[in-house]
Image (cartoon, rainbow, N blue to C red):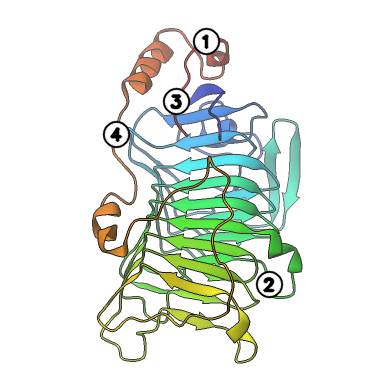
Amino acid sequence: MGGKNGAIYVVTDPSDDPVNPKQGTLRYGAIQTQPLWIIFERDMAITLKNELMMNSYKTIDGRGARVEISNGPCITIEGVSHVIIHGISIHDCKPGKPGMVRSTPDHVGERLGSDGDAISVFAASNVWIDHCYLARCTDGLVDVIHASNLVTVSNNYFTQHDKVMLLGHRDGYTADRIMKVTVVFNHFGPGLVQRLPRVRYGYAHVANNRYDQWIMYAIGGSADPTILSEGNYFVASNDPYAKQVTKRETYDGWKSWKWRSTNDVFVNGAYFVPSGWGSCAPNYVTSQYFGAAPGSLVPALTSDAGPLLVCHIRMLTYIVLYYIHIGPLEAQHRDFYFEGH
């Protein structure tokens, strides 16, 4: 849902203040308590001074502009729900320093310092990360931890990174057993080493993704996760020691873990080691269900992974009216809403 039923907020200013953000900046919109659909006035490169704390019911929509968040701390989605991050490039993220950061208009709290993830999802639910470019961060590109649930990572382009996507806090954190994550239609491009994703507990449906020559492994796990690999396109490198798609971070007990491959395509000697027994089918409700395509179609299905440079008429209309007489938050009283997500 994100900010579907909220006002449109236009980012006009790429500057950042973690404690007292100015109206027109990305942080000012992200921390508001009401639902907001956040768009960008123009192409914009944003370097945050500390981690960006998202509030619930927000959509960050980069369509119609080239939007980059880079070279500083990046996005934290912590203890909130219904957040969509769409159509932006997030790269070269750095750890955040300990200090005060505003998370709502009425609350400023001390943060201990972020790890340098592109997007950290921490004790959050109903999160959708879609059509983003993610690369070269200090820690992970997408980390989903601390009993986060109902997370979808789709249509993204990942490249040039070591530990790409972690699902689960640590092996001893059993609260992560509730976690359900869908990883679909992504292009895992060149220069990726491992964790595409790595799953500790919970359930991961990994479907219709393209994998180009991982360096260590593609899909890993360590604490009895359930993984369904469906309709993916795996291209191994020429390294004879990096042909296996899968890796278990243990030598004991893994043969009972439910890891299945169905309708996957394996190229250049790639192979998947299955395990376990019983059903691995995703437990989607009707509105969530999708039928995965055969792996042979994945190169076409993922050809538009990453940000889409599409400028919608309704977005243009809003921006024109904004310049005439509407402030970004005053639009909540007017009938300008996006449809879709």
Residue 153 position (above or below residue 39): below
Label 1, residues with CA under 10 Å away: few <14, some 14-19, many ≥20:
few
Element under disc 3: loop
Give the Cα distance between marks 1 and 4: 24 Å
Circle nearer the N terminus (2, 1):
2
Instruction: Please tell me how crowded label 2 is: few (under 14), some (14-19), or many (20+) other residues with Cα within 10 Å.
Output: some
Front residue of 104 and 190: 190
* Rendered residue at 51%/51% (across/down): 152
Residue at numbered disc 4? 310
Tell me the element at label 4. loop
| Amino acid of disc 3 | Glu
Which x, y percent locates residue 88?
40, 44
* 295 to 111, vertically: above or below: below
Could you say which quadrant of the image residue 263 lies in? bottom left
Sequence-earlier tag: 4 or 2: 2
Instruction: Check whether the beta carbons of the residues at disc 1 and disc 4 lie within 8 A of each other.
Output: no
Number of the label disc, if any, that sits on residue 170: 2
Mark 3 in CB contact with mark 2 (< 8 angstroms)? no
Q: Amino acid at mark 2?
A: Arg
